[in-house]
Image: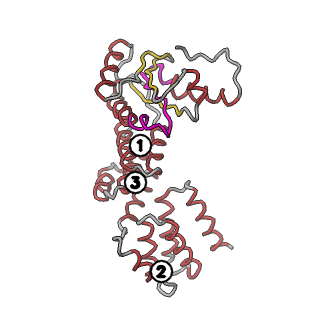
Amino acid sequence: MEFDVASMGLNLEEQKAVDRFRKNVVEPSMNALVILDFWAEWCGPCKALTPVLEKVAADYSDKGVVLAKVNVDEEGFIAGQFQVRSIPTVYAIFQGQPVADLTNARSESQLKGVLDQLLAKLPIKPGGAPAQDIAPLLAMGEDALSGGDAERAASIFSQIAEIDPASGAAYGGLVRAMVALSELTEAEGVLDALPAELASDPEVTRARAALELAKNRPADNELAALHAAATPDNPAGQLAYAEAAFAAGNRDGAADTLLAMIAADREWQEGAAKAKLLQMFEAVGLEDPWVAAQRRRLSLILFG
């Protein structure tokens, strides 16, 4: 099978799909062995196979192996070119060409066995592959985390950190996943072990803010009492409730309370409510749609 589109009459979307494939698969395969995984979000077997592929790719990254994933729902044209009839479908790609069908290698040992055979035959030197583009892997971790699968997210971010130990985004994602799993002590240990150059990374700073806020997570029977005490004449109680609500996952409740405090007295405790709200923004991520919406509400209060 050869992926050759030079003579095709492609429309704009198809050309964009080809360009993405060339960048994410063909170009890396010039020097590396690419595991190409065709998958879909709704595919149960795909989700079962994904952790195996991710682990093997991480274990073999120093041997010149990288992982690339193609969502068949988003890249139907590419899937069609490979005549994908069922998923998961997995190929090994070298220098732009499929060199093995890995679809039936469903276990870690089976996959490593096939890769060992391929690496013995192909002119790939250990360490000779270009640095893996970790952006798709980071996106995969973020998708898992936002989808509620913090355990898988932690595994993905941990493997990315092995591939690229200088990635602040990988460590930041790992810490946030640990926070979601209530592994606060372990998360703090990860942050404490980071070198100084990573400790100031924006993604690490974001994760640290998330960890600090999570330390205020109340017991199940405490949140209602804190809410009852959060009256307009008790700003300290309002602040305590906002911290606890955010830590318990009620971001809207926390933001509503803090914005009401700012509207009533923005200077209370040297702007403590605004400072806490900004800390929450940092923990969630400044590009997050929820943050953008709350920023607009804050601007209306501050500037009318």
Instruction: Return the x and y of residue 119 as percentages of the image width and height.
Output: 35, 17
Q: Kindly indicate the quadrant of the structure image that contains residue 295.
A: bottom right
Relative to the observer, which residue lies in front, 105 or 237? 105
Determine whether 4 is above or below 56 in the image.
Answer: above
Instruction: Return the x and y of residue 28 as percentages of the image width and height.
Output: 48, 24
10 Å crowding of disc 1: few (<14), some (14-19), many (20+): some
Answer with mark 1 or mark 2, whichever residue precedes in sequence: 1
C-alpha distance separating marks 3 and 1: 15 Å
Which residue sits at x=44%, y=15%? 99
Residue 167 got which mark? 1
Which residue sits at x=40%, y=54%? 176
Which residue sits at x=41%, y=71%? 244
Answer with mark 3 or mark 1, whichever residue precedes in sequence: 1
Residue 3 got which mark? none
Mark whose residue sits in front, 3 or 1: 3
Determine whether 157 is above or below 209 in the image.
Answer: above
10 Å crowding of disc 2: few (<14), some (14-19), many (20+): few
Instruction: Return the x and y of residue 262 as percentages of the image width and height.
Output: 56, 77
For numbered disc 1, what is the local secondary structure?
loop
Residue type for callout 3: Arg
Position of the C terminus, as image quadrant, is bottom right
The answer to whether residue 92 is magenta is no
Q: How is the image coloured?
A: secondary structure
Instruction: Return the x and y of residue 246 as percentages of the image width and height.
Output: 45, 67
Task: Specify the segment rendered in magenta.
Answer: 27-48
Residue bearing the label numbered 3: 176
Determine whether 291 is above or below 132 in the image.
Answer: below
Residue type for callout 1: Ser
C-alpha distance separating marks 1 and 2: 37 Å
